[in-house]
Image (cartoon, rainbow, N blue to C red):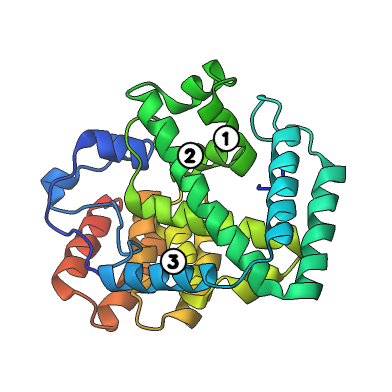
Amino acid sequence: MILAGRRLRGGAPVALGLVLLALAGLALWFSPVQEDLDPVLDLWRPTPPVRARLAALRALRREVAVPVDAGRRLEEAWREANTASWSGDGPGVPRAPALESRFRSLAQEIIRDHGAGVVAAVGTTLSDHFLEALGRVEGLAGDEVWSRWLGAHAGDPAVQELRALGGDLPERSFATGLLPARGPADPDRLLVAQILWFSHWCEAARKGLARELVSPEEQLLLRLWKVEDSERLSFARRRQVMDEVRLAAPGYPADFVLGVLAAREGLMDEAREHLAAARDAGYEPALVGRWMAWVERQSPP
């Protein structure tokens, strides 16, 4: 397959279903209602001004003039590679290296003749189509489990369109929590999925192209989502990504977030260290104090 701030909600009770969905097993040892603490981080979510800037950026990309033949050939190559590589067996299926190579060669030819902006314009438009295809499948699946519905309706035109545009990206998104197991998708996570799609498109076109075409603000949103919301990263990996966040957004409460993440995983020494750093930095003293008190209560006497 070719694809491979706001405050933390400090005092609101969290529905048990949300906790179980977002943080597997957390409810076994943590009671946010009793503690008046919310373990679900949402500082990553884009504010309205951020959403507006990202929408304006996508609009600018679409304004680049795309030669009709170049755009058509690039889209066809993308669709062929994704369709050929999807066997219905899920992530890890055999790829279609010849078709992927064809797409990359064509993209590099277009970059050479017309500039990278043309590849970005086509990719931006197709990323919109990908979200539209997700929306159609969401409507058809209704309350059914998405992955089961997709498997049972592989021949449906809506599913085939989704596969041609995104290959196994839906399955990868189920695994990370970007897409829900069932029901409506979260708009903020859909925005992250669209940026991820565009990043994969750029890398498929030319290695390293994502660093040129994915804006710093888009890259920051991806990193914030990975740190706070992805369901697949270890604490060690989140801390590595956080190093990049610290450089890009010095005002982001990195130590507070790391403290909450460590506490969620039962890493109390790490939680104590990062929460103390957050306290010393003056971030939300009352909230940090409640978290530190909770962490101390988990330590053996």
Q: Which residue is mark 1?
A: 161
**Rendered location of residue 202, percent (x, y):** 66, 62
Res 79 → quadrant: top right
> Quick check: 225 left or right of 114?
left
Question: Which amino acid type is marked by label 1?
Answer: Glu
Question: Which amino acid type is marked by label 3?
Answer: Leu
Q: Give the mark toward the camera: 1 or 3.
A: 1
How packed mark 2 is, by other alpha carbons closer than 10 Å (few <14, some 14-19, many 20 or more), is many
Distance from disc 1 to disc 2, alpha carbons, whole Å, reads 7 Å
- Outermost residue to the right: 98
Sequence-earlier tag: 1 or 2: 2
The kind of secondary structure element at disc 2 is helix
The image shows residue 246, relative to residue 34, as above or below, that is below
Distance from disc 3 to disc 2, alpha carbons, whole Å, reads 23 Å
The kind of secondary structure element at disc 3 is helix
Sequence-earlier tag: 3 or 2: 2
Q: Do labels 1 and 2 touch, CB within 8 Å?
A: yes
Give the residue drawn at x 25%, y 43%.
30
Q: Which residue is mark 2?
A: 133
Res 26 → quadrant: top left
> Quick check: 263 left or right of 224?
left
Give the residue drawn at x 25%, y 59%.
296
**Foreground residue among 188 and 74:** 74
* Number of dots carrying numbers: 3
Q: Which residue is mark 3?
A: 221
**Rendered location of residue 169, percent (x, y):** 58, 42
**Foreground residue among 297 and 300:** 297
Q: Give the mark toward the camera: 3 or 2.
A: 2
**Rendered location of residue 236, percent (x, y):** 54, 59
